[in-house]
Image (cartoon, helix red, strand yellow):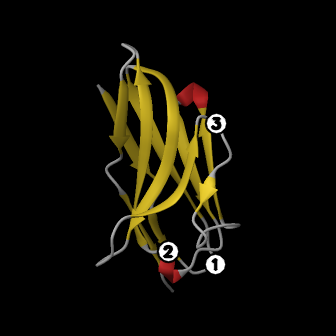
């Protein structure tokens, strides 16, 4: 069984920065696809960034040039660096990983969500 634990959300002023973390634990052979989504109040969940099998990340237009996805393989951790934050970035952020488990199964996993609030 694989679990994801997110951290790093919080309250930040416009123009500020935050780094979200998503740590995966359990029987993990590899992480194929990693992504971040967000859901603002009253809106549908939307894709923020996704990268497949180490390819070039796809960023939503609204975050291009401001957000960066990265990973630390030794810790099975995925990060989302968010710079120049805007009030419209306020949302609950979720990490989403497609993992190959130790038994060779492909598993889609979601984090529990972390609140990001951008406000003065």
Looking at this rendering, what residue extends furthest in the top direction?
A: 103
Callout 1 secondary element:
loop
Please determine whether, in this image, residue 102 is positioned above or below residue 45: above
Spatial distance from mark 1 to mark 2, Cα to Cα? 11 Å
Nearest the eye: 55 or 42:
55
Q: Which numbered disc, 2 or 3, marks the residue closer to the eye? A: 3
Marker disc for residue 93: none
Query: Under tag 2, what secondary structure?
Result: helix
Identify the residue at horizontal 31%, vertical 76% (top origin): 41
Task: State the CA–CA distance, disc 3 to disc 1.
Answer: 29 Å
Q: What label does residue 15 carry, if any? A: 1
- Kindly state the secondary structure of the residue where label 3 is placed: loop
- With respect to residue 94, does 66 lie above or below? below
* Among the 4 quarters of the image, the one containing residue 114: bottom left
Q: Which residue sits furthest bottom?
A: 120
Give the position of the N terminus as an image quadrant: top left
Q: Are marks 3 and 1 in contact (CB under 8 Å)?
A: no
Q: Position of residue 19 (x, y in %)?
A: 56, 56
Camera-side residue: 50 or 28?
50
- Residue ID for mark 2: 89
Query: Residue sitting at 54 percent across and 50 percent down?
Result: 50
Percent of width and height locating residue 58: 61, 55
Q: Which residue is mark 3?
A: 54
Contact flag, marks 1 and 2 (Cβ < 8 Å): no
Q: Earlier in the sequence, mark 1 or mark 2?
A: 1
Q: Position of residue 98 (x, y in %)?
A: 43, 36
Left or right relative to 112: residue 117: right
Identify the residue at horizontal 59%, vertical 29% (top origin). Answer: 73
Near mark 2 (Cα within 10 A), the count class, few <14, some 14-19 or many ≥20, is many
Question: Tag 1: Cα neighbours inside 10 Å, few (<14), some, or many (≥20)?
Answer: some
- Lower position in the chain sequence, tag 3 or tag 1: 1
* Left or right: 80, with 44 as reference point: right
């Amino acid at each position: 069984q694989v679990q994801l634990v997110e951290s790093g959300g919080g309250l930040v002023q416009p123009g500020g920065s935050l780094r979200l973390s998503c740590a995966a634990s359990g029987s993990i052979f590899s992480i194929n696809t990693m992504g971040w989504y967000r859901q603002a109040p009253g809106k549908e969940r939307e894709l923020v960034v996704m990268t497949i099998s180490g390819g070039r990340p796809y960023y939503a237009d609204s975050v291009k040039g401001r957000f960066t996805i990265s990973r630390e393989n030794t810790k099975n951790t995925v990060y989302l660096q968010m710079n120049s934050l805007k009030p419209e970035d306020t949302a609950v952020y979720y990490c989403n990983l497609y993992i190959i488990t130790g038994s060779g199964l492909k598993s889609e996993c979601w984090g529990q969500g972390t609140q990001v609030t951008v406000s003065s």
